[in-house]
Image (cartoon, coloured by chain):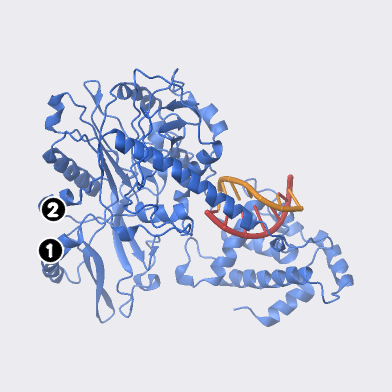
Chain colours: A blue, B red, C orange
Amino acid sequence: MVSHKCVEEFGNESYFLPANARAPRSSRKRRSIKKIVSEDEDMRAIDLLATVAGHLSFESCSSLMSIDKLVNGIEDNRVKEEFPVEEKPLKPVALFEENPYQGSFSPCGFSSVINGKVENEAEGFSYSGGSDACHVENFTQDVKPGIDGDAVVLDGRPNVVVSLGSSSRTEVPLVGSCASHGVRDDVNLFSRDDDENFSGYIRPRVTKSSPRTVPRIGDRRIRKILASRHWKGGSRHADAKPWRNYYSHHQRSYPINKRKYFDQISDDYGLRTKMHRGSRRVSSMKGEGVSFVSSNSHVKLRIKSFRVPELFVEIPETATVGSLKRMVMEAVSTLLSDGHRVGLMVQGKKVRDDNKTLHQTGISQDNTHLDSLAFSLEPSSETPQVLTSYLSGHACEELSPVCQAANMHNVLEFDHDTSLFPSDSLGNKNLTDDSKPLIPVALTELASGPPCRKYKRSEQQQQQTAQRRIRRPFSVAEVEALVHAVEKLGTGRWRDVKVCAFEDAEHRTYVDLKDKWKTLVHTAKISPQQRRGEPVPQELLNRVLNAHGYWSQQHMQQQQPQSINNKQEQETLSQKEGLLCGPLSVV
DNA sequence: GTTAGGG
DNA sequence: CCCTAAC
């Protein structure tokens, strides 16, 4: 709560309006333009990608089909197991451990799919997506920039590539009958974790006869968009961005079961639940909804089903149904056993802090949002570092043989609930009528001169593709210093704040400070239960609100200088500024 | 180079 | 933390 008294005090003594303070930028209209441009570019990118997907699909004479039924077909074999809460140790796959974010780049750099080509931005090394483009309308598509996976090369041909989440990289040989038919028998599985970190595999393809040069269509802007999308994986906040919405829904865990099946087994689970009432045990991966059964101070949950991360399957149409079933079964089994953990969402928000009590999280016996709780399976790794694995030199070398085995193939995908496709903010109803999940399979050709040499990419690539800085949460001490500085200097003078209070903190830019202040204001406004990370003392948050309110008011008055205001006071206060920088330094 | 704001 | 328009 903002104390009126405090505000008064700040206004009289603690806050200083700089004599040269400029009108707040908020008074300048510019955002609207940017937004329009951005959306437009998004649309262009989408169009391009639609073409790609359509091409790929059409080219391979395949049609999208749901393997939902196939998934159901393996239900009888579904795994019953407990899901350990504790995380399994991550596999040491990251090449650049100091920066887990590097994993966002493909083996030879960032890859994006543009008009059927995959471009490796960093190395100027591209693949091409086969023959002439076919436009297929009403086809939804996706891009998977930066993908991880292990190529399994058998008999010189790629076989099966499965990548499940961040911590599990599993190679599952396909046991299909078509292997003997001389048809490439490769199956790719893609999985997305709950944090929008995509894991998967892009198999480049070489069209031996047409080593054409891949035009670098899609200006850099588009590639940046794609890259940017990928980075969004670290974001914790849902926003209204069309792509964001898309990913939010499609990269989230996907209920492997469908309603039909669910109904069929519901009774079974009811029984089972009773048996385990009050127990921590979870004996099923099924069931989506969760309901409460209250009694005394205990919260009792019934998990009707579990979500597993979305899977993508790529398989030749000549493969047998049986092989596909086995493959899916293996994938699911692997998913459950290899480095996944349980995720919890309450009212649409992921609960990451394992130390919070259920009550603090909002899970209480008097909780009335019975449907607001959801469990999911998710990769045990939060960061996209697995993707890094493909940055290794060996991955690049493995690429070549893979590329040699170009062939048509089909892409199947798990059927999605239409409800999972929200209308985006552009007004596009899921982009297309029978929109399907994206099928970003990059088929390309190896461009001339593979610049992808072992252990040679890092320097050049790191220069070309600026690495995202690691996340460095602000300590309470830093927050304190920031609050103090803003109290004195106000918002809008972030450079001064930096110089005065964070001069020696190399890793804190004034933009960082500005951003932190933004989040602090937000944090101060939300309920303590909704806050995450190291708790900021309420006292500090109160100061944040006070200062924010005060300076906002100052800015308002500057916009509309109706009141003559106290010119002399400003001057007086400005003179004091010099004294303020001393004790604020934070390292 | 800074600032503001959306992502 | 990133990106970028507008200064």
Which mark, residue A188? none
Q: Is residue A95 above or below residue A527?
A: above
Q: Residue at x 18, y 40 (%)?
A: A327
Q: Is residue A325 visible?
A: yes
Chain hosting mark 1: A
Q: Position of residue A548 (x, y in %)?
A: 66, 69
Q: Position of residue A561 (x, y in %)?
A: 81, 72
Q: Quadrant of residue A18?
A: bottom right
Secondary element at tag 2? helix
Q: Position of residue A258 (x, y in %)?
A: 20, 58
Left or right: A406 as drawn, with respect to A242: left
Three-letter amino acid code of the residue under disc 2: Glu
Mark 1 burial class by Cα count in 10 Å: few <14, some 14-19, many 20+: some
Pick the residue in front: A378 or A39.
A39
Q: Quadrant of residue A295?
A: bottom left
Q: Quadrant of residue A261?
A: bottom left
Secondary element at tag 1? helix
Q: CA distance from mark 2 to mark 1?
A: 10 Å
Which mark, residue A75? 2
Left or right: A215 as drawn, with respect to A387: right
Q: Residue at x 19, y 26 (%)?
A: A183
Q: Residue at x 48, y 66 (%)?
A: A531
Q: Residue furthest right?
A: A568
Three-letter amino acid code of the residue under disc 1: Ile
Chain hosting mark 2: A
Mark 2 burial class by Cα count in 10 Å: few <14, some 14-19, many 20+: some
In the rendered structure, are the residues bearing label 2 and label 1 in contact, judged by CB atoms less than 8 Å apart? yes
The reply to the same-chain question for discs 2 and 1 is yes
Nearer-N-terminus badge (2/1): 2
Which mark, residue A265? 1
